[in-house]
Image (cartoon, rainbow, N blue to C red):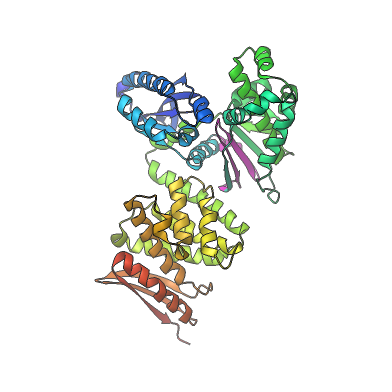
């Protein structure tokens, strides 16, 4: 094949905890096929989970590996691969310096994905690879990384639950290092730690029929369990995984290394990975097997890169799953779902009709939808400080596929009416604060239009008219409360946009 003339080729570099990887893929008959895969060891995890920062020695190793990748990509005529990093650089105190040095030394811009963003790509690729399995019922899916664990429940069509736990195989091994050196019965401590960690996931009311796990050391564990790969996944018998756990739980890393002929550091990660996978089995004890597709974030990223409709497909996937998981959280906080749906509909209508006024990208529409779903959750905690509680609850959430900044935007829009937005958004840039002000102004109008929680207004229409924003709706009920709330919200809207919103309601003939 003439590589330089091959169409639809893309490259992704993933900067991980223990390795930096290059994946080159080509779109063939609608599917991303890997043409080349390279991997170099790095020590970023040891640095970050030990001292909190990437050392200059590790930075030089990373830069050297990236230079080799650049040379390899010349044969594919690729000068600008997409470079992503996840948990390790995200937690590094000097991540901005590392990203800057990579830009200066290697001419590459590093995209540091948040934990929820990383897991969204991985779960998307996991579902893609298991599309032919036709799993029935709810599926518990987990990705075990070196620095974090992503957990999700899929109902066959979409995710309905999502959590990101900031502990992975490498991080767990390093965090418990001192205990490991002190305790002779370290495996008991590991069992207790994993039980305490995973017991925070409240899935007792969710029936789970299938168990899908991927991540760190999964192929090695599958082979140790004698699993066969069919389709896109290994099928690991649950009993075999239990037996592997029983055989390794009381062994030291040195003994494991000697048994399998692997470096001691790899043996240590195998040890913690087996403990984590064994703990995850308790979420679905009736599953006779674990489906284990070998998946990493680069596969998910490059598949969307090569797709002709990548932007629209990713936005649709993200919206469906983020809203579904948010609705699950809203149910837990006893939010009024009918009201949330009504407010979300109004907010989207205003956002779409007033594009020339707000000038925001289409992606910000999802922020309004999520704010509508979650804006009542603080009332479950405190009726007196429901706005503050709403903000705090959302700010601490893992929203499927969203960055930490986007989660903050949702929190400020949903809970901002009772907060000092300038104070809460003090760490954001001027442009980001303006975006939040625009979204908040639109959301407050939408929320006011259903002040009674009765969905009184129908067929809402919005239009710009010189110095006014005209809203028209129909109703068969008394809308005095909504009109009062609308006037209260109109002041903030005018402060942000400089236009006065006006509401006209046409009442049904009796």
In screen coordinates, is 110 left or right of 220?
A: left
In screen coordinates, is 385 left or right of 110?
A: right
Could you tell me which residue is drawn at 49 percent across and 82 percent down?
Answer: 478
In this view, the residue in front, 454 or 475, is: 454
Residue farthest to the bottom, as pictured: 510
In screen coordinates, is 411 left or right of 429?
A: right
Give percent across and percent down for residue 140: 64, 41
In this view, the residue in front, 154 or 490, is: 490
Whether residue 374 can be seen here: no
Could you tell me which residue is drawn at 45 percent across and 73 percent down?
Answer: 458
In screen coordinates, is 401 left or right of 255?
A: left
Q: In terms of image quadrants, where is residue 301?
A: top left
The quadrant of the image that shows the N terminus is top left
Residue farthest to the left, as pictured: 466
In this view, 478 is above or below 202: below
In this view, 363 is above or below 241: below
Give percent across and percent down for residue 230: 61, 27
Whether residue 71 can be seen here: yes
In this view, 63 is above or below 334: above
Give percent across and percent down for residue 62: 41, 22
In the image, residue 157 lies in the stretch drawn in magenta:
yes
- The mark total stands at 0
In the image, residue 200 lies in the stretch drawn in magenta:
no
Could you tell me which residue is drawn at 30 percent across and 22 percent down?
Answer: 4
Give percent across and percent down for residue 502: 34, 75
Q: Which region shows up in magenta? A: 130-159
């Amino acid at each position: 094949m003439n590589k330089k003339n091959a169409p639809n080729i893309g490259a992704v570099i993933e900067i991980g905890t223990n390795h930096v990887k290059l994946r080159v893929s080509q779109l063939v008959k609608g599917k991303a096929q890997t043409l080349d895969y390279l991997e170099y060891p790095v020590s970023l995890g040891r640095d970050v989970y030990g001292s909190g920062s990437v050392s200059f020695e590790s930075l030089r190793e990373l830069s050297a590996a990236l230079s080799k990748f650049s040379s390899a990509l010349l044969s594919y005529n690729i000068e600008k691969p997409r470079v992503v990093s996840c948990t390790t650089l995200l937690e590094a105190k000097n991540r901005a310096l590392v990203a800057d040095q990579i830009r200066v030394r290697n001419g590459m811009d590093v995209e540091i994905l948040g934990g929820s963003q990383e897991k969204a790509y991985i779960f998307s690729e996991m579902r893609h690879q298991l599309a032919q399995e036709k799993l029935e019922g709810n599926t518990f899916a987990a990705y075990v990384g070196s620095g974090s664990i992503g957990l999700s429940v899929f109902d066959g069509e979409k995710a309905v639950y999502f959590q990101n736990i900031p502990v992975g195989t490498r991080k767990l091994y390093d965090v418990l290092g001192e205990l490991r050196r002190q305790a002779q019965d370290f495996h008991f401590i590991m069992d207790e730690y994993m039980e305490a960690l995973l017991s925070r996931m409240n899935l007792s009311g969710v029936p789970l029929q299938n168990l899908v796990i991927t991540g760190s050391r999964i192929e090695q564990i599958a082979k140790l369990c004698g699993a066969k790969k069919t389709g896109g996944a290994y099928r690991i018998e649950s009993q075999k995984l239990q037996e592997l756990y029983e055989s390794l739980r009381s062994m030291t890393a040195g003994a494991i290394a000697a048994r399998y002929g692997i470096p001691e550091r790899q043996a240590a990660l195998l040890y913690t990975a087996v403990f984590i996978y064994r703990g995850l089995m308790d979420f679905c004890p009736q599953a006779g097997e674990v489906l284990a597709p070998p998946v990493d974030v680069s596969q998910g990223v490059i598949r969307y890169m090569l797709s002709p409709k990548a932007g629209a497909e990713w936005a649709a996937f993200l919206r469906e799953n983020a809203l579904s998981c948010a609705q699950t959280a809203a149910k837990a906080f006893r939010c009024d779902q009918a009201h949330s749906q009504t407010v979300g509909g109004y907010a989207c209508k205003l956002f779409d009709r007033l594009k020339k006024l707000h000038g925001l990208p289409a992606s910000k529409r999802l922020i309004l939808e999520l704010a509508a779903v979650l804006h009542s959750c603080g009332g479950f905690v405190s009726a007196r400080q429901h706005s503050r509680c709403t903000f705090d609850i959302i700010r601490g959430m893992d929203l499927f596929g969203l960055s930490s900044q986007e989660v903050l935007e949702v929190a400020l829009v949903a809970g901002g009416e009772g907060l000092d937005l300038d104070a809460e958004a003090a760490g954001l840039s001027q442009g980001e604060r303006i975006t939040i002000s625009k979204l908040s102004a639109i959301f407050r109008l939408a929320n006011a239009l259903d002040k009674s929680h009765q969905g009184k207004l129908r067929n809402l229409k919005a239009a710009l008219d010189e110095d006014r924003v005209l809203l028209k709706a129909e109703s068969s009920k008394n809308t005095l409360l909504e009109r009062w709330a609308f006037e209260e919200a109109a002041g903030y809207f005018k402060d942000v946009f400089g236009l006065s919103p006006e509401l006209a309601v046409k009442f049904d003939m009796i």
